[in-house]
Amino acid sequence: MTASTHLHITTWVLTLILFFVALGLHKSGKAKAQKIVHMILRLFYLLTIATGGMIAHLMFSQYPITYVLKFIFGFLVIGFMEMVLVRTKKEKKTTMFWVLFFVSLIVVLVLGFYLPLSF
């Protein structure tokens, strides 16, 4: 496994942790702390995309379609995470975005374990 793979795994694990921490802070009524964690989470979105792009760039010539699919679904996961947080803050329904988040996350994880440079 390459260093970029380790970095990517670290960033997406921290992204998921920060996502659930931000949700927990919102539910407990700690708006200021939630806002700070949400801003840090947005930085981790960018880091996850950047590290995923590094891996895709390394492997694109060998497995182009599967990496494009993983990249697209990775963007969707991040988008649905953001939609859940924003809609939760606005007290709107989030059920559809939770379902889409989990489906996209499962697709990304399956592709991630299927593709080279994974575990």
Image: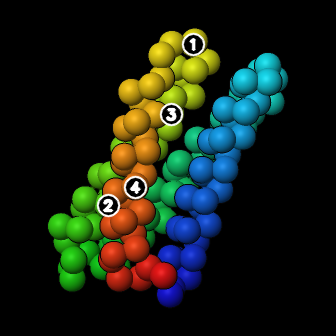
Residue 78 is situated, as x and y percent measured from the top left of the image, at 46, 44
Residue type at mark 4 is Ile
* Label at residue 106: 4
What is the spatial separation of the Cα atoms under label 2 and label 4, in whole angstroms? 11 Å
Q: Residue at x 19, y 71 (%)?
A: 64
What percent of the width, then of the height, locates residue 10?
62, 66
**Residue 32 in view:** no
Question: Which residue position holds label 1?
Answer: 90
Q: Mark 3 is on which residue type?
A: Glu
Display colour scheme: rainbow
> What is the CA distance from the residue labelled 3 to the residue labelled 4?
17 Å
Front of the two marks 2 and 4:
4
Q: Quadrant of residue 111?
A: bottom left
Q: Quadrant of residue 102?
A: top left
Numbered mark located on residue 14 in the image: none
Please name which of the two marks, 1 or 4, marks the residue nearer to the observer.
Answer: 4
Q: Give the Cα separation between the discs numbered 1 and 3.
A: 12 Å
**Type of amino acid under label 1:** Lys
Q: Position of residue 55 (x, y in %)?
A: 40, 73
- Which quarter of the picture shows residue 68? bottom left
* Mark nearer the N terminus (1 vs 2): 2
* Res. 18 in view: yes
What residue is rendered at 43% in x and 41% in y?
101
Mark 1: which secondary structure?
A: loop
Vertical relation: 25 (above or below) 87:
below
Q: Secondary structure at mark 2?
A: helix
Please name the residue that numbered disc 3 is placed on: 82
Q: Provide the secondary structure element on which disc 4 rests.
A: helix
Of labels 2 and 3, earlier in sequence is: 2
Gap between marks 1 and 4, in whole Å? Answer: 27 Å
Q: CA distance from mark 2 to mark 3?
A: 18 Å
